[in-house]
């Protein structure tokens, strides 16, 4: 997610599950080619596979960016064909690419030509108010003929005329049935469902024959959901760490980093105690940390409450 899943956030998430795949923010190809050291810090953990998501519309840029990705240690590059932001539209990438399957195919082939790199695509159901399965099917079919066998699908259309990026995250109606139908049409292709997933609906969705689920806002708004879901799926290897254990790990991770980074490290943890008695106190603590840039505030919170609560 843009402005969310930076390397600090990914480190935090890696403490909540050692099995889930993690995504970078979408990074424009040109930015990665010329500023890779600034945009992508070395991953400080190896427990989770991290997928690099790229934005662009020029096959030659995707090729150069993929070589950079391989040098950085990535094994999978994801082409973003789903972002509806006005800025991305002006660059003729994101969801706009769904209108030009041959161009997406060229971009895919460029990425796929680099040895030891897998390529996947993230897309929406379509563009506009009306659902059109034939439009979606044609897009998937064209890319599958080019060799793409993995799609992450946000099960909403993108409405570009009047809707903001935030509107497009929630307002267009969900249509999971289209994704289920795609799996029936292309049963040799992996389809990972994204959009509107939460604790209440995933058990129903898991009964369908999809290949995975992709979470965004549900995890960011309730990070402990990651840990709960990990333990539900991997019951033989349950994690027993508490929230206080996680906080202490992040504190250790923060040591030696400039004070200017403290805000970006701890902002991702704002909802760590969601639904629990310490939630308001923790949010106030995080707000103070972000404002004052002092780790001591978090240390004092841990010292005061760790022995009183076991969650």
Image: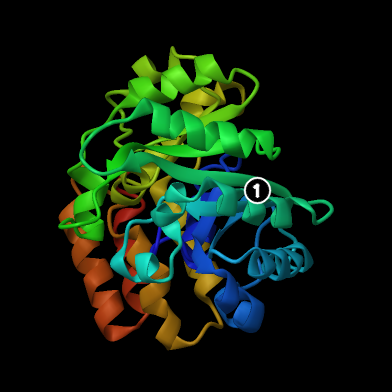
Write the residue at 60% across / 43% down.
18
Q: Please state, as top left, top right, bottom left or bottom right, where the N terminus lies in the image.
A: bottom left
In the depicted view, which residue is nearer to us: 295 or 228? 228
Write the residue at 72% across / 57% down.
110
Q: Please state, as top left, top right, bottom left or bottom right, where the C terminus lies in the image.
A: top left
In the depicted view, which residue is nearer to us: 311 or 129? 129
Q: Is residue 197 left or right of residue 20?
A: left
Write the residue at 45% across / 44% down.
123
Q: Is residue 306 visible?
A: yes
Residue 89 in the image: above or below residue 223: below
Q: Is residue 75 visible?
A: no
Instruction: Tell me the quarter of the picture where residue 234 sits.
Output: top right
- Where is residue 120 drawn, in percent x and y? 61, 44
Task: Report which residue position mark 1 lands on.
Answer: 49
- Where is residue 230 drawn, in percent x and y? 50, 33
Q: Residue furthest right?
A: 115
Write the residue at 72% across / 70% down.
64
In the depicted view, which residue is nearer to us: 308 or 191? 191
Mark 1 Cα-neighbour bin, 10 Å: few <14, some 14–19, many ≥20:
some
Q: Is residue 66 left or right of residue 220?
A: right
């Amino acid at each position: 997610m843009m402005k969310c899943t930076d390397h600090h956030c990914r480190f935090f998430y890696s403490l909540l599950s050692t099995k889930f795949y993690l995504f970078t923010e979408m990074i424009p190809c040109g930015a990665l080619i010329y500023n890779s050291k600034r945009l992508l810090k070395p991953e400080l953990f190896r427990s989770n596979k991290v997928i690099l998501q790229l934005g662009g519309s020029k096959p030659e840029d995707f090729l150069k960016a993929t070589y950079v990705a391989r040098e950085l240690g990535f094994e999978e590059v994801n082409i973003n064909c789903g972002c509806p932001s006005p800025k991305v539209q002006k660059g003729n990438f994101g969801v706009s690419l769904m209108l030009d399957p041959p161009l997406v195919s060229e971009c895919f082939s460029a990425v796929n030509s680099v040895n030891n790199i897998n390529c996947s695509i993230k897309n929406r159901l379509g563009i506009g108010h009306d659902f059109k399965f034939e439009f979606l099917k044609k897009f998937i079919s064209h890319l599958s003929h080019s060799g793409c066998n993995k799609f992450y699908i946000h099960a909403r259309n993108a409405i570009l005329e009047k809707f903001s990026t935030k509107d497009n995250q929630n307002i267009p109606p969900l249509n999971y049935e289209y994704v289920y139908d795609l799996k029936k049409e292309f049963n040799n292709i992996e389809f990972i469902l994204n959009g509107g997933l939460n604790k209440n609906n995933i058990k129903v969705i898991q009964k369908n024959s999809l290949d995975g689920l992709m979470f965004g806002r549900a995890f960011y708004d309730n990070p402990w959901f990651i840990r709960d879901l990990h333990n539900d799926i991997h019951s033989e290897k349950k994690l027993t760490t508490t929230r206080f254990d996680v906080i202490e790990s992040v504190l250790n991770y923060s040591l030696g980093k400039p004070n200017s980074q403290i805000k970006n490290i701890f902002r991702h943890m704002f909802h760590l105690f969601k639904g629990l008695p310490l939630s308001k106190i923790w949010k106030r603590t995080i707000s103070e940390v972000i404002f004052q840039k002092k780790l001591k505030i978090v240390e004092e919170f841990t010292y005061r409450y760790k022995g009183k609560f076991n969650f």
